[in-house]
Each structure stands twice: as structure tokens, then as C-alpha cells.
Amino acid sequence: MERKIYNCETGCPVESTLQLISGRWKSVILYHLIFEGEHRYSELQRKIPGITRRMLSLQLKDLENDQLIKRQVLQEKPLMVSYRITDYGYSLKSVLKVLHQWGADYNQRNEGKLEEECLACK
């Protein structure tokens, strides 16, 4: 899916950035690859328990098409694939770090009021 890149007004770059990392899973996938390093498909699936196999595949393809991650086939049979962050994707590290900190502060501020517990934290 080709992204629309906006460059018209002050807020447009924010919208362009959000197109690349928005959705429930992309930023989480990027977080794991940036802060933990290269992961195989099955490792990512274990680290993100709420994601379906199909959704993980779609999100990884989008991130690869946007040149934020690189896919590498490690073994043909059985198929073993690994994903790593690209230099371009790594440039999002400071953005994700701030999002992580803001989310941690929000969760602490609203402790006891949140509807769901994180599946990965159990």
C-alpha cells in the first residue's frame, strides 16, 4: 500500500510519521526490533501475544515496504525468517523511547482505572 506523504502545513510531517508507525502493532514491532535487536518471526509472535499470525505478517510487510525493517531468510526448509531494523527505521528510536516513557507515565497515573492488563506482561 503506497503511503500519502504530506508536506503542506506545519502538522503534515506528524501525519506522515503516524502513517508509518500507526496501528495497534507497528510501533510495538518496531520497539522490539530497535531495543532488543533482530528477531525471528516466531519470537515476535511470542512477544506480542495479542497479534494474529496474519496481522503480524501484514504489519511486517508494511514495515518492510516502508524500508523500516529488513527481512532475511535464514533457512529454506523449514522456512526460517528473521527481521531487523534498518538504519532508517533506527532513526525512530528517540520517537519510540518518548512514546514508551509517556505510556509508562500514563499507565502509572491511571493505575487501577485501566480496563485491560497487557497480555505480554503476565
Image (cartoon, rainbow, N blue to C red):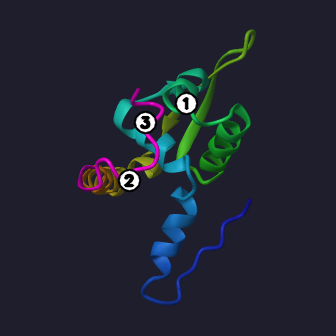
Give the quadrant of residue 98.
Answer: bottom left
Residue tagged 2? 91
Judged from this view, the residue extending furthest toward the top is: 77
Vertical position of residue 92 compared to residue 64: above or below: below
Residue 115 in picture, x, y percent from top left: 45, 49
The N terminus, quarter of image? bottom right
Q: Position of residue 2 (x, y in %)?
A: 71, 64
Q: Secondary structure at mark 2?
A: loop
Residue at x 29% of width, y 55% of height: 110
Mark 2 burial class by Cα count in 10 Å: few <14, some 14-19, many 20+? few
Mark toward the viewer: 2 or 1: 1
> Which residue: 67% across, 35% down?
52
What number is the disc on residue 49?
Answer: 1
Q: Nearer the viewer, residue 28 or 2?
A: 28
Kind of residue indicated by mark 3: His
Could you say where residue 14 lies in the image, as x and y percent from the top left?
Answer: 45, 74
- Compared across the picture, whether 77 is left or right of 69 comes to right
Q: Nearer the viewer, mark 1 or mark 3?
A: 1
Tell me the residue that label 3 is attached to.
32
Q: Mark 2 belongs to which amino acid?
A: Ser
Indicate whether 28 appears above or below 120: below
- Give the vertical position of 98 relative to 44 (above or below): below
Residue 58 appears in which quarter of the rendering? top right
Q: Quadrant of residue 32?
A: top left
Task: Magenta stretch: give its range.
Answer: 108-122
Q: For this view, does 26 lie left or right of residue 1? A: left
